[in-house]
Amino acid sequence: MASGVKPRVKVPKTAAAGEAVTIKTLISHNMESGQRKDKEGNVIPRSIINRFTCDFNGENVIDITLEPAISTNPYFEFQALVPEAGEFKFTWYDDDGSVYEDSKKIALG
């Protein structure tokens, strides 16, 4: 597991049924591409978040495959329709097999 990895998510607390809400996510991660070398000339192993998904009440909202060119601390902002009250589940997948998760509930208002 990479050190210092911290997911952060911003979801409105309420929405009207059928409303599109803006969701913002950021995960603190150093994102090493695997192409740089250390002081001794050894290749620094690749270590990136390679996939990000968001589900709402078990249905996929977004599924993104990330490549080595992604920046440090990847940030995503997207819209999702809220048909009912429920829970968004966010998942980040790391090259080393680690999985980082967060979830946020949203109510109808």
Image: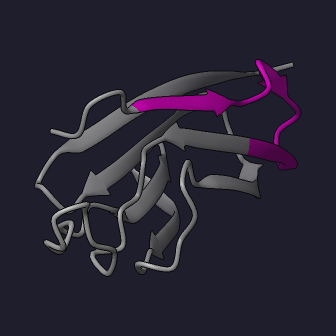
User: What is the residue that sits farthest to the front in this orientation?
Assistant: 40
Count of numbered tags: 0
Question: Quadrant location of residue 42?
Answer: bottom left
Vertical relation: 106 (above or below) 31: above
Q: Residue at x 43, y 60 (%)?
A: 52
Vertical relation: 54 (above or below) 68: above
Image position, residue 40 (x, y; %): 16, 64
Membership of 14 in magenta stretch = yes
Vertical relation: 90 (above or below) 66: above
- Render colour scheme: one colour
Q: Which residue is drawn at 47% across and 69% down?
A: 63
Give the left or right position of residue 36, taking residue 76 as reference. left
Specify the segment rendered in magenta: 6-23
Quarter holding the N terminus?
A: top left
Image position, residue 34 (x, y; %): 27, 75
Quarter holding the C terminus?
A: top right
Give the left or right position of residue 85, taking residue 30 as reference. right
Q: Residue at x 36, y 50 (%)?
A: 92
Image position, residue 9 (x, y; %): 62, 31
Q: Viewer-proximal residue, 87 or 46?
A: 46
Helix, strand or loop for the magenta stretch, by majority: strand
Q: Viewer-proximal residue, 100 or 103?
A: 100
Give the left or right position of residue 91, taking residue 15 as reference. left
Q: Residue at x 58, y 54 (%)?
A: 74
Image position, residue 85 (x, y; %): 65, 28
